[in-house]
Image (cartoon, rainbow, N blue to C red):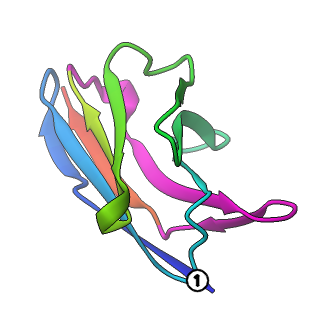
Amino acid sequence: QVQLVESGGGLVQAGGSLRLSCTASGSINRLNTMAWYYQAPGKERELVASITHTGRTDYGTSLKGRVTISRDNTKKTMFLDMINLTPEDTAVYYCRLAQGIGPQVYWGQGTQVTVSS
């Protein structure tokens, strides 16, 4: 099994920044892809960004240009740096890890980000 724990969410004013972290533990295959998704109230979960084990990144459209995804493989941790936050970015942000055949997909519990105007 794989466990994912997100941290770094909270309340921030519009125009502010946050850094989210996701730390993985358990049976992790180093050849994995990690990603951040977000889900705003009443909306579907949407990709923010993904990063492969080699560091190749891909960004969704909604927050592109205001977020940077990175990872530290030695610490099994992924980061999401967000800048110029707006109230529309308010959502629960989830960490996802995909590995192996299928692939097998694991999700974290999510961390709430609230941006006040």
Does the segment drawn in magenta span residue 48? Answer: no
Q: Quadrant of residue 72?
A: bottom left
Stretch in magenta: 84-109
Q: Judge left or right: residue 59 versus residue 80.
A: right
Task: Check the picture and name the quadrant holding the N terminus.
Answer: bottom right
Kind of residue indicated by mark 1: Ser
Residue placed at 61% from the left, 70% from the top? 29
Residue 47 x/y as whole percent: 59, 36
**Where the C terminus falls, by quadrant?**
top left
Q: In the figure, 51 relative to 53: above or below?
A: above
- 65 and 25: which one is in front? 25
Residue sitting at x 42%, y 44%? 91
Q: Which is nearer the eye, 88 or 54?
A: 54
Where, by quadrant of the figure, is residue 74 drawn?
bottom left
- The residue furthest top is 65
The percent coordinates of residue 112 (x first, y second) are 34, 55
Residue visible at 18% across and 40% down? 18
Q: Would you say residue 98 sits in the magenta stretch?
A: yes
Location of residue 103 by image quarter:
bottom right
Residue extending furthest right?
102
Disc 1 crowd rating (10 Å Cα; few below 14, some 14-19, many 20+) is few
In this figure, which residue is indicated by the disc labeled 1?
Answer: 27
Element on which disc 1 rests: loop
Q: How many marks?
A: 1
| Residue 32 percent location from the top left of the image | 61, 57
For residue 93, above or below residue 59: below
Residue 5 image point, x, y percent = 39, 72
